[in-house]
Image (cartoon, rainbow, N blue to C red):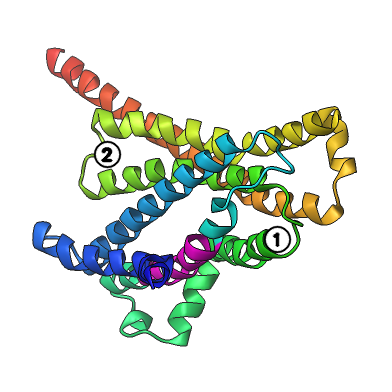
Amino acid sequence: MLHVLFCGAVVFPGLFVVFRKVLPSIFKQWTDADVVLVSERLVSSIHAIMATTAGFIVVSSCNDVIMDRHWLATYFVVWYGVPYMTYDIFAMYLSHYYRFRVKGHEEYKEHSFRTFRLFVRREFLLVLHHIALLTILLPITLFYRNDQGDYFIGCLFLTEFSTPFVSLGKILIQLGLQDCWLHKANGVMVLLSFFSCRIALFPYMYWAYGRRYGLPLHSVPFHLSLACNLGNLCILAPQVYWFVLLCRKGYRLYQRQGKARDSPAVADGAKAD
């Protein structure tokens, strides 16, 4: 009974509903789009902290990266990972819906198949990422590992380490604090955590596998099945794409702040003349 009460299918939607009820009473000027966005980001951060903690426990408990077992590797995917990914698709849709409804788009007056189709079209890569995790990670975790590789499942949990920083950045912007030092410091942490835990982690896992069998890194892909390599590539490819977008966004923000600093100096010089 406790498993049913505390599993992700209840926890994550429940937290989302609570945040949607509480936030409007604190930030009375926020629109529905603002409340849904921040609620989604807060729940996402809670899941990320849980996943990172589970990943650290699994990784630190497995000395043999192939044979050692830890119950969290399967338990967390079934009871929290899958329910969260399913919930998050719905939460992202609500965020998309209210964002465009507040802007006055005619087709967003009420929920419909058309609004959901527009959401999928606009957020196709994110939706595909979630579906891929549901259809690839879950079957591999439950049926195709032969009770091996809990260490690598734990490593995949660690990819969520960057999510709280990404969420914090969006929340700070929502609060109008995008020019404060915390937002700048958080931006650095977003790039560092995203690169280390969502991109560099994959070569590390190949290296860890090679060390287990005495293989050099460059030969590891040839000792793994095609399905394994393709699965890793499907997860890694969007991470690289999103990292490039983050770098571009950070660079544009840096340029805007530089121009903002230069503008007063130019104006002061003009007044002095």
Q: Is residue 87 magenta?
A: yes
**Taking 68 as reference, is 31 left or right?**
left
Quadrant in the rendering for residue 96: bottom left
Q: Which residues are magenta?
A: 78-96
Quadrant location, the N terminus: bottom left
* Residue 187 screen position, x and y as percent: 39, 34
Residue bearing the label numbered 2: 178
Q: Is residue 104 above or below residue 138?
A: below
Instruction: Name the secondary structure under disc 1.
Output: helix
Quadrant location, the C terminus: top left
Residue bearing the label numbered 1: 140
* Residue 149 screen position, x and y as percent: 71, 47
Q: Is residue 254 magenta?
A: no
> Magenta span: helix, strand or loop, mainly?
helix
Specify whether residue 173 is in view: yes
Kind of residue indicated by mark 1:
Ile
Mark 1 against mark 2, which lies toward the viewer?
Answer: 1
* Residue 11 screen position, x and y as percent: 35, 65
**Taking 17 as reference, is 53 left or right?**
right
* Residue 133 screen position, x and y as percent: 61, 61
